[in-house]
């Protein structure tokens, strides 16, 4: 159980990990996530499932190394075991034939976006995908996205690949060109905030998949709470997807930084031990 | 459920019990004073996670056991949700057969070392004790004695494993490994069923692990009791969420004949007042889970923790006491309880309140928070509190707290732990739309059999009660085991 069978670096700090989890591979749907704990002293973190292979009994996770846990996870090699993998958690994405879908992914948010794009495509939608990152080497899963999208628009901050500009500029280009019925945005909170503001301008229903801090992931702790439409909701059991126009992204951004100092200090200590 | 009177009578009329009763006149027994629990001094214990109560010595336990007059009609047992044969185990202690005393506990209780520590005996067995009922005097210290016998057995290394009946080859499952699930598993294993306990978290024990702190219930105690269940053949699967990882239907297809849902009251309640989502305001579940399950206070563990210097805990139950006493141990200069009723109405155990006071916890009774404020980073730094007065009794029989207009004032805080109760965990009801639930989300059961509206599904503990105690959950687990056994005898086994 939980053995890593495949590992591939997308860039220096973004890694794809394929892990044996037959039960989860069988029951997971687009939008679901898992909670993992790398080792005995590790913390529990949520990771959205990118893809799964029911025949092989595997799920695919994409991780960006930003702190201790993601670094420890990325340091595992093929054959190593992730101590705990539990899921699938959260509500699956509500997939219907809506017409034209504008799917927007930023950074590693592209990984959880992939199964949603796939599901919308298979449900008969026209899917236009916008992938955004700081630079070319951070654009991931482009080929897989192309497989399930009618068109893939690439945006980079530095113009090293695709068009130069922010994700919102890519979105507006599509919105000004054709009718969009639904937008899905997944990425860093700040990107989702501006993506949501963009679609709101054009009155396009939009959902965002939130990536908050979690401990248990089953509704027990409330660490993941966000304000949606003025009400407190739990991302782990009510989400992770919500109406992006109702989400209080400013509060979410603050809450994501709740343990910033501790995390930074722990990461520095971790890096020091690794370098030795 | 009631213990067969004949059985108790028969046990009581055994030669050794008769002899023992005659050895000392009841009048003489009544003259002994109740033993005091040994405790680690407050100033010492708040600097560590050491268990506060350190137990009784053999001499103390035997002396206390003499106080029990071995009543012909032992009313104490009627106060015990798992119906321990209380006089029998106490008399075993009196004669010095401590290992036998532990065996008596295990006849009906899966977790005696746990219950001896966390049960509210003062509201249960001890409240029904002859001393309390008829003499208005301090009850026999049944809880201390229970803990003594269980600890003695564990420390002796001669841990007995209850007898299990011949294997029936019938698979049943418990969903959740908290006190309800463990009690259920123990009884079903004794009856010869093949029991698997599914647990969502990475550790077995549910609230005993993530909720109750080390200073009240060391994790090791829980682990050893769980080991006992393993020896009885119970299997455990962690990281497994029934309804998500696999559905009930999947498990039915895997051969499980019946299920017990003991998934607990997992969903923390908040007060929905302004500013409640600021950083540094968290549920008691989150706070305690970080510290107890994830060991966040220990540097070598990765889970981060906000170590507050001024910590306000909102609520008056045992979980609130656990949280505020944890905050003190983690170095808070000021750790306070803010509760809207008076101290008399607090649902926490008397012992917990006493211990908390000794440890320097401040009690702001008849106060309630109405708004939180934060610094520029979003970290809570101040709360607005309103004073309350007590009005007429409400539905709970306690006097209703009424806000006093214009009494608001401010308290500087850096951490707030909200411990105002929990709602039932929605995972199982959400996975089973046909399951009948109340409007509060608790599962509806037949009170005698604990059977739900789905015939092969039984339930108990907080998912049914909405927020109760370890021992009531265990009582439910036992009752569900009896109900499920009957159901299986009538349906599954008749078909074979």
Image: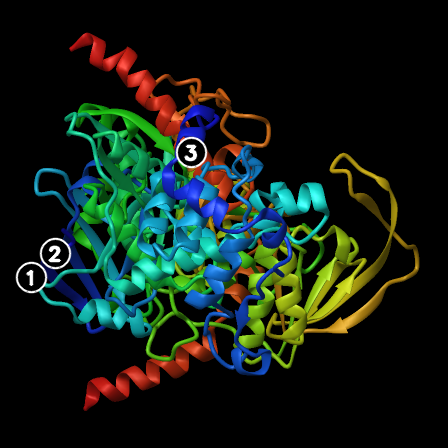
Give the class, few, some or many, for how many residues have Cα within 10 Å of label 1's Cα (few <14, many ≥20): few
Model colouring: rainbow
Residue carrying label 1? A79
Chain on which label 2 sits: A
Q: Which mark is residue B13?
A: 3
- Residue B417, located in which quarter of the rendered image? bottom right
Report if residue B49 is visible in the image. yes
Give coordinates of residue B100: x percent, y percent.
Answer: 32, 49
- Residue at x 45%, y 29% (from the top left corner): B9
**Front position in the image: B132 or B446:** B132
At mark 1, the secondary structure is: loop
Give how far apart the Cα atoms at labels 3 and 1 are.
Answer: 64 Å
Residue carrying label 2? A3
- Residue at x 45%, y 53% (from the top left corner): B146
Residue, far right: B406
Rendered position, B87 above or below B417? above
Give how far apart the Cα atoms at labels 2 and 1 are.
Answer: 6 Å
Give how far apart the Cα atoms at labels 2 and 3 are.
Answer: 60 Å
At mark 2, the secondary structure is: loop
At mark 3, the secondary structure is: loop
Q: Are marks 2 and 1 on the same chain?
A: yes
Horizontal arrangement in the rendering, residue B212 relative to residue A23 (left or right): right
Horizontal arrangement in the rendering, residue B158 relative to residue B201 (left or right): left
Horizontal arrangement in the rendering, residue A238 relative to residue B366 (left or right): left
**Mark found first going from the N terminus, 2 or 1:** 2
Q: Are marks 3 and 1 on the same chain?
A: no
**Front position in the image: B53 or A184:** B53
**Front position in the image: B209 or B220:** B220
Q: Are marks 2 and 3 in contact (CB under 8 Å)?
A: no
Q: Are marks 2 and 1 in contact (CB under 8 Å)?
A: yes
């Amino acid at each position: 159980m939980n053995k890593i069978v495949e590992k591939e670096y997308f860039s220096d700090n973004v890694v794809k990990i394929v892990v044996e989890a037959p039960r989860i591979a069988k029951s997971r749907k687009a939008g679901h996530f898992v909670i993992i704990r790398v080792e005995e002293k590790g913390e529990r973190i949520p990771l959205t499932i990118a893809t799964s292979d029911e025949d092989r009994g595997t799920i695919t996770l994409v991780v960006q190394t930003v702190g201790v846990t993601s670094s420890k996870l990325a340091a595992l090699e093929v054959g190593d075991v992730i101590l705990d993998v539990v899921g699938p958690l959260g509500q699956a994405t509500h997939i219907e034939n809506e017409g034209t879908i504008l799917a927007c992914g930023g950074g590693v948010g592209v990984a959880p976006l992939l199964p949603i794009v796939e599901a919308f495509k298979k449900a008969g939608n026209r899917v236009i995908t916008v992938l955004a990152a700081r630079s070319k080497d951070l654009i991931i899963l482009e080929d897989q996205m192309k497989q399930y999208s009618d068109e893939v628009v690439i945006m980079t901050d530095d113009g090293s690949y695709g068009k130069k500009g922010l994700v919102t500029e890519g979105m507006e280009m599509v919105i000004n060109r054709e009718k969009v019925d639904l937008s899905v945005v997944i990425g860093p909170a700040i990107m989702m905030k501006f993506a949501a503001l963009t679609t709101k301008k054009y009155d396009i229903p939009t959902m965002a998949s939130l990536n908050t801090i979690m401990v248990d992931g089953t509704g027990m702790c409330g660490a993941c709470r966000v304000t949606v439409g003025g009400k407190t909701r739990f991302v782990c059991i009510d989400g992770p997807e919500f109406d992006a126009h109702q989400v209080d992204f400013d509060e979410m951004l603050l809450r994501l930084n709740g343990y910033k100092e501790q995390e930074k200090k722990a990461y520095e200590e971790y890096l020091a031990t690794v370098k030795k | 459920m009631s213990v067969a009177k004949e059985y108790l009578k028969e046990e009581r009329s055994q030669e050794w019990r008769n002899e023992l009763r005659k050895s000392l006149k009841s009048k003489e027994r009544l003259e002994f004073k109740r033993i005091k629990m040994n405790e680690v001094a407050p100033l010492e214990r708040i600097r560590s996670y050491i268990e506060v109560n350190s137990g009784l010595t053999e001499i103390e336990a035997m002396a206390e056991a003499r106080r029990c007059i071995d009543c012909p009609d032992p009313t104490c047992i009627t106060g015990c949700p798992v119906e321990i044969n209380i006089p029998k185990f106490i008399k075993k202690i009196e004669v010095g057969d401590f290992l036998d005393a532990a065996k008596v506990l295990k006849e009906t209780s899966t977790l005696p070392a746990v219950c001896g520590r966390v049960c509210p005996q003062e509201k249960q067995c001890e409240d029904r004790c002859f001393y309390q009922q008829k003499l208005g005097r301090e009850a026999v210290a049944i809880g201390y004695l229970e803990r003594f016998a269980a600890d003695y057995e564990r420390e002796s290394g001669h841990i007995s494993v209850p007898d299990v009946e011949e294997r029936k080859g019938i698979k049943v499952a418990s969903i959740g490994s908290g006190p309800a699930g463990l009690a259920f598993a123990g009884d079903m294993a004794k009856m010869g069923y093949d029991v698997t306990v599914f647990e969502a978290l990475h550790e077995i024990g549910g609230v005993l692990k993530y909720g109750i702190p080390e200073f009240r219930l060391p994790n090791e105690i829980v682990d050893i009791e769980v080991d006992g269940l393993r020896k009885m053949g119970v299997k455990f699967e962690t990281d497994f969420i029934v309804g998500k990882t696999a559905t009930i239907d999947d498990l039915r297809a895997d051969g499980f004949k019946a299920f017990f849902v003991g998934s607990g009251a997992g969903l923390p309640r908040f007060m929905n007042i302004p500013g409640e989502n600021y950083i540094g305001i968290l549920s008691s579940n989150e706070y305690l889970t970080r510290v107890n399950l994830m060991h966040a206070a220990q540097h070598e563990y990765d889970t981060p923790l906000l170590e507050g210097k001024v910590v306000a805990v909102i609520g008056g139950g045992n979980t609130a006491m656990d949280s505020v006493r944890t905050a003190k141990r983690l170095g808070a200069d000021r750790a306070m309880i803010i509760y809207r009723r008076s101290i008399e109405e607090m649902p926490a155990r008397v012992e917990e309140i006493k211990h908390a006071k000794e440890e320097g916890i401040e009690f702001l009774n008849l106060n309630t928070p109405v708004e939180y404020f934060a610094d520029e980073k979003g970290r809570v730094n101040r709360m607005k509190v309103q004073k309350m007065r007590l009005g007429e009794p409400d539905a709970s029989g306690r006097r209703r707290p009424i806000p006093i207009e214009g009494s608001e004032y401010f308290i500087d805080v850096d951490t707030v732990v909200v411990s105002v109760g929990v709602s039932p965990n929605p995972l199982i009801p959400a996975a089973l739309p046909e399951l009948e639930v109340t409007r509060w989300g608790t599962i509806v059961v037949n009170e005698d059999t604990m059977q739900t509206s789905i015939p092969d599904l039984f339930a108990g503990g907080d998912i049914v009660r909405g927020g109760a105690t370890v021992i009531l959950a265990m009582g439910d687990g036992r009752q569900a085991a009896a109900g499920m056994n009957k159901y299986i005898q009538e349906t599954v086994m008749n078909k074979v």
